[in-house]
Image (cartoon, helix red, strand yellow):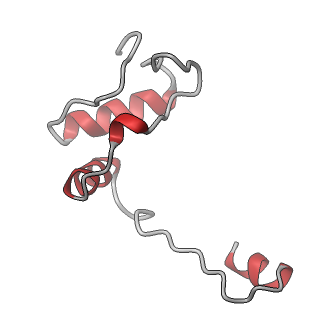
Amino acid sequence: MQSVIRLGTKAANIRIHTPVLHMSKKDIVLKGMELNVPFELSWSCYKDSDAACGVCPSCVLRLKAFAQAGLRDPIPYREQS
């Protein structure tokens, strides 16, 4: 993507940074807590909008990451697998 941006835009100073690319989901959650990330404002669910479904692949990964970090995910879920 960095090459595409460099070749396809006039603004050559655009850079892509991926600081969490090589981190586990658990470590991302822990780093987020350290940085006071408002996880209650984030969303991962593919299916629902009022409450996360709790069963789609994205919800399962998110719930697992919070569980492995020893934390409760602050967003509402319809169900949890």
Q: Is residue 11 left or right of residue 8?
A: left
**Picture coordinates of residue 30 (x, y %)?**
22, 52
Q: Residue at x 44, y 28 (%)?
A: 59
Q: Quadrant of the N terminus?
A: bottom right
Q: Residue at x 33, y 30 (%)?
A: 63
* Outermost residue, bottom side: 12
Q: Quadrant of residue 41?
A: top left
Q: Quadrant of residue 68?
A: top left
Q: Is residue 10 left or right of residue 38?
A: right
Q: Is residue 45 left or right of residue 39?
A: right
Q: Quadrant of the C terminus?
A: top left
Q: Residue at x 40, y 63 (%)?
A: 20
Residue situated in front as seen by the camera: 11 or 54 = 11
Residue situated in front as seen by the camera: 54 or 12 = 12
* Outermost residue, left side: 70
**Picture coordinates of residue 28 (x, y %)?**
32, 54
Work out whether 64 lies above or below 26: above
Q: Residue at x 27, y 54 (%)?
A: 27
**Picture coordinates of residue 32 (x, y %)?**
29, 53
**Picture coordinates of residue 54 (x, y %)?**
42, 19
The number of discs equals 0
